[in-house]
Every structure is written in C-alpha cells, then in structure tokens.
Amino acid sequence: MREVFEYLDKDKSGSIDDKELILGLRILGLNPTEGEVRELLHSQDRNNDGLLDLNEFSSLFEECKSISQVNMDSVKQYFDQFDRDNSGYLDVNELREALTSGGE
C-alpha cells in the first residue's frame, strides 16, 4: 500500500491531492470527473484538509477493492446465468441470449 501511495504522491508532500488521485484512478483505467474525484477524496478525508494521508488513502483503497469485488461477483453471477452447460465459456447461442435478454 505504501508503495502505491508513494508512487501517486508525485510532489513527495506525504499526502495525495485531487490531481494525484485522479492520475491514480486513470492508471486503473477509470475516467472520473473532477467532481467525482473531489467527492471521493472528501469521503475519506477525516481531518478535512483536502488531502489524503497514507491512512486515509488506505481506507479509500480498501473501499474501492470492496466495490470492485461486488462488481466482479455481479458479472460472474450474470455470466453463470447464461453459461447453461457450465463450461466456463459462452457459446454463440448463450452469448446471443445474454446480449438480447436485456439482463433479465
């Protein structure tokens, strides 16, 4: 965790600001708006200084991991719903059904 924090702390201030956080999220393949980043930062900024220290960043990271796991669980559940033969793959018919069902 410390290594990730230090990598994102580009100015070596010992804290991560909104610009450094947005960079980290973009490295992960996300494209949040500045408003979303400010909201995310504010949700973990316990001392209200507008920055994340290592402990605050660690809390944010754990929350993101938890959300990510929930999303992956949902994707797997949806996939399993259409993998009728439990092969671990969707054949053409299973894929067609998944794409045309509207998630039902």
Image (cartoon, helix red, strand yellow):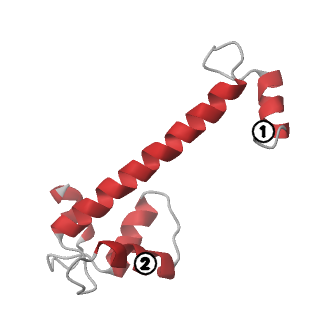
Q: Position of residue 69 (x, y in %)?
A: 44, 43
Q: Residue at x 17, y 65 (%)?
A: 55
Q: Residue at x 22, y 68 (%)?
A: 56
Helix, strand or loop status at disc 2: helix
Image quadrant in which the C terminus is located? top right
Q: Position of residue 85 (x, y in %)?
A: 69, 12
Q: Amino acid at mark 1?
A: Glu
Residue on which the image places disc 1: 104
Which is in the foreground here, disc 1 or disc 2?
Answer: 1
Q: Position of residue 62 (x, y in %)?
A: 30, 54
Q: Residue at x 23, y 72 (%)?
A: 9
Q: Position of residue 73 (x, y in %)?
A: 51, 37
Q: Amino acid at mark 2?
A: Glu
**Residue 13 position (above or below residue 92):** below
Q: Is residue 80 left or right of residue 34?
A: right
Say which quarter of the image contains residue 75.
top right
Label 1 to label 2: alpha-carbon separation: 33 Å
Rate crowding at label 1 as few (under 14), some (14 to 19) or many (20 or more) other CA atoms within 10 Å: few
Say which quarter of the image contains residue 103.
top right
Q: Is residue 13 left or right of residue 97?
A: left
Q: Is residue 73 left or right of residue 62?
A: right
Residue on which the image places disc 2: 39
**Residue 97 position (above or below residue 65):** above
